[in-house]
């Protein structure tokens, strides 16, 4: 069978690259996918099963864990609250889709792992680490794209009229949906779709010499991965190291974070030197008000505890002057101590299937307080600088 020939007309999600390499395209929340994977491993008897998972996703499927208070503190101090929220929102989207099909996200991958263990063949994890993927996607997106993505994930409640099974059975439809998603966030789409197609193809190519290989990947990647592996094309797929690079943080935010306090101190010094005490007091007042109000507003949106709101409001004018600190950290830490998550909260957070629960779950609320407190503080600092400059020029 040649590349591009579907194994069966009635099943367009099985693709034979050659006699020793078969790829199955699955829907992550489909009961049909689970049965398809189990049947193929049993009937085809591969020597190795390659699965579209990374180490962390594999662990979350096979060894569900809980979030401890220490984990939350580390997330806050490392500035990863926004990334964890984005990952949770993506997971919630998949779980919401899976609720109608009766399968949890990744059920077909878990089935592949168990079936491979049953016939005692090795398993190869072929996906890029989810954190690296999300960071690369987030770094590539502009402000408008980030807003579109968060709006689509968190606030767009329109029901999808297309069922999971329809998407799985109709590859053209699935590709159309992926392209529609790319229109919302083209730069993120390059990372989430194109880069991962290349990454998966490279990893599959690296294990092709281990006998009969059965690769289980998302149906949305089937065409892209197949294209990379067509003929001699796979020999050109050699960018694993590059694709695994963590994105460099842009230098301009650091410059701005240093420039803002220097500017403020310069204005204060100049006013003090010229004896403009009244203007000096007004400038300091504007800085405090803008920072405090917007930091507090962000925490209120997150439905933080009143004490978290107060702490964030007090911390914001000070932390905005120190590039190594953030008001959201203090507010998040306060939220963690005042309204500590329980073991039940941690378990529920890991299986959230509705975005609104982020505001009700204590773990989600700590992360939201941290992220929105930081965002509010940053906006307040920018507006304060603009207000101060306007007063000087006026």
Image: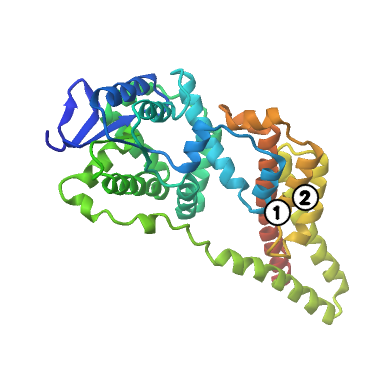
Few, some or many residues within 10 Å of mark 2 (<14, 14–19, 20+): many
* C-beta proximity under 8 Å, tags 1 and 2: yes
Return the residue at label 2: 312
Q: Which quadrant of the figure contains the N terminus?
A: top left
Return the residue at label 1: 377
Examine the rendering and report whether any part of residue 360 can be seen. no
- CA gap between label 1 and label 2 equals 8 Å
Say which element carries label 1. Answer: helix
Q: Is residue 363 above or below residue 165?
A: below
Q: Is residue 33 above or below residue 263?
A: above
Examine the rendering and report whether any part of residue 230 can be seen. yes
Q: Residue furthest front?
A: 120
Query: Image point 23% across, 26% down: which residue?
Result: 44
Marks 1, 2: nearer the viewer? 2
Say which element carries label 2. Answer: helix
Residue 75 rendering spot, x and y as whole percentages: 64, 48
Residue 36 falls left or right of residue 89: left
Q: Which is nearer the N-term, disc 1 or disc 2?
A: 2
Q: Quadrant of residue 154?
A: top right
In depth, the one of 126 and 13 nearer the eye is: 126
């Amino acid at each position: 069978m040649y590349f591009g020939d579907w194994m069966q007309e009635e099943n367009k999600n099985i693709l034979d690259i050659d006699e020793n390499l078969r790829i199955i395209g699955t829907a992550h929340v489909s009961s049909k996918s689970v049965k398809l994977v189990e049947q193929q491993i049993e009937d085809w008897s591969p020597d190795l099963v390659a699965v579209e998972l990374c180490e962390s996703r594999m662990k979350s499927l096979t060894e569900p864990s809980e979030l401890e208070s220490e984990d939350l503190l580390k997330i806050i101090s490392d500035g990863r609250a926004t990334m964890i929220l984005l990952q949770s929102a993506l997971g919630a989207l998949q779980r919401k889709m899976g609720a109608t099909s009766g399968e949890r996200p990744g059920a077909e991958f878990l089935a592949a792992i168990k079936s491979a263990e049953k016939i005692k063949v090795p398993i190869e994890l072929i996906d890029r680490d989810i954190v690296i993927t999300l960071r690369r996607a987030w770094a590539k997106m502009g402000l408008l794209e980030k807003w579109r993505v968060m709006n689509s994930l968190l606030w767009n409640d329109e029901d999808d009229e297309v069922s999971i099974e329809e998407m799985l059975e109709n590859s053209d439809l699935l590709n159309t949906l992926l392209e529609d998603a790319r229109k919302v966030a083209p730069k993120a789409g390059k990372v989430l779709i194109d880069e991962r197609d290349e990454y998966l193809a490279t990893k599959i190519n690296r294990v092709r010499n281990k006998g009969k290989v059965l690769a289980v990947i998302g149906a949305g990647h089937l065409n892209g991965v197949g294209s990379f592996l067509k003929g001699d094309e796979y020999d050109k797929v050699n960018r694993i190291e590059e694709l695994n690079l963590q994105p460099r943080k842009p230098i301009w935010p650091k410059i701005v974070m240093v420039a803002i306090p220097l500017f403020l101190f310069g204005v204060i010094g100049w006013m003090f030197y010229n004896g403009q005490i009244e203007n000096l007091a007004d400038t300091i007042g504007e800085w405090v008000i803008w920072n405090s109000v917007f930091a507090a507003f962000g925490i209120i949106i997150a439905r933080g505890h009143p004490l978290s709101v107060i702490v964030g409001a007090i911390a914001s004018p000070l932390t905005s002057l120190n590039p190594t600190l953030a008001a959201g950290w203090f507010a998040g830490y306060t939220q963690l101590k005042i309204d500590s998550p329980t073991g039940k909260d941690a378990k529920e957070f890991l299986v959230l299937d509705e975005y609104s629960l982020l505001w009700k779950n204590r773990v989600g609320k700590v992360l939201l307080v941290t992220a929105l407190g930081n965002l509010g503080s940053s906006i307040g600092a920018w507006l304060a600088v603009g207000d101060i400059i306007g007063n000087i020029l006026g």
